[in-house]
Amino acid sequence: MRLEKLEGDLFKPDYEQFSIVNVSNFVLEHFGVQTVHPAYPLRHLVPGISEGVEKIVFFLIDALGMTSLEKLLNKERVFHDYTILEATSVFPTTTSSAITSLLTATTPIEHGILGYALYIKQLGTLLNMIELSSPIMGKVTSTLNNKDLMFEKTVFERLLEIGVKSFVLTSKTIRNSGLSTLVNTGASIRSYQSFGDMFSKFREILQEDGPFFCFAYWGLLDSIGHKLGVDSDAFESELYWLLKMLAREILPILPKNALLVVMGDHGQIYTPWERETWWSWKDPISQFFSIPPGGEMRMMHIYTAEQKEVIKYLSEKYADRAISMTREEVLGLQLFGNVPSTSSRAIERIGEVVLIARENYSFYFKYTGKEESLKSKHGSLTLQELIVPLMLFRR
């Protein structure tokens, strides 16, 4: 996989063949559903890997980047028989955009979830796309339906149309969260309450009859990375025991007609506090804002009527910390994916200026003043954030 460089240490996602979008299109192709994008070339790279497969299972570990996995496996060989490949996440490299891409088989510009916080024109406010609430006003009363927020069918819906069932295994705490209700449509949803319960429910799903697709999700690694750091002992220990339990509890009973793919949605990068930039309405740059910035701490949507002025200001003050581009430039580079003719609603969610953090810099906006510094973050396009593993298991 050769990636095209954007600038410096930043690279573009590979939506042509090797992104997580292509991985989910492999699922559609395998079950005989019309693909939306080219399928990940799994059969070419690993001949025979999908031969006789009736069940495809994705076990997604939030924030599992290739860098973190290699660091662990270089210390200890957790598994004895597996194949490991690489894929890119999407832009921005964040859960809301990446998981939506994976579970719709489409790019962010197609499905419309272009970051953690987005300006939703119909509501006239920023919306946290995980909880579907305003970071400023809290819960938002809305008459918008799912298709007003996410513009594409899920993989589960596409499979259901040809009679292939799907399962989602997720934490009880997020089962009915805003994003979950969007991306899990069409699947039979099972939820777990703990580490052990998750593996118990996992085993139950594997015993289901007939062909199916299953998406299992574990989110705690991401939380540990944010709070304690991607290089912390706690992060490595969580990942180690998660994989160790997988090897003990799942691999021995994996059906012979099943393909298990253990993967990440994005990685994380250590972001020290001294490389954080904090903005509020008191800072000079805020004079250009129409509303508070959206996006992430390492990728901001800046909504402004003074595009040229913002670009000039950022270039003068923060050229060493971030690159800044106009909405038109970002679309031209296809960072969010190739722009379809039906994407006008998605385009209006992109800031007139898009800021992408360099190295391990990050940017905060004080919406309420209660924001906390995070030790590791994601959202930008460094290799640590962009490259995720695909670990393939067959019996």
Image (spheres, helix red, strand yellow):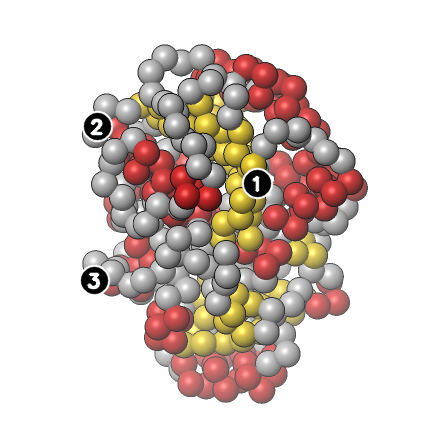
Disc 1 versus disc 3: nearer the observer: 1
The residue where tag 2 is placed is: 162
Which image quarter: residue 90?
bottom left
Q: Position of residue 327 (x, y in %)?
A: 38, 73
Nearest-to-viewer mark from 2 and 3? 2
Disc marking residue 84: 1
In the rendered image of this protein, does residue 86 appear above or below residue 163?
below
Q: Residue at x 44, y 23 (%)?
A: 258
- Give amino acid for label 2: Ile
- Crowdedness near tag 2: few (<14), some (14–19) or many (≥20) residues, C-alpha within 10 Å: few
Tag 1: residue type?
Ile
> Mark 2 and mark 1: span between their CA atoms?
30 Å
**What residue is shown with label 3?**
341
- Can residue 28 be seen in this snapshot? yes
Instruction: Please tell me which of labels 1 and 3 falls first in the chain.
Output: 1
Q: Please rate how many residues cluster around mark 3, counting C-alpha atoms within 10 Å: few if below 14, some from 14 to 19, many from 20.
A: few
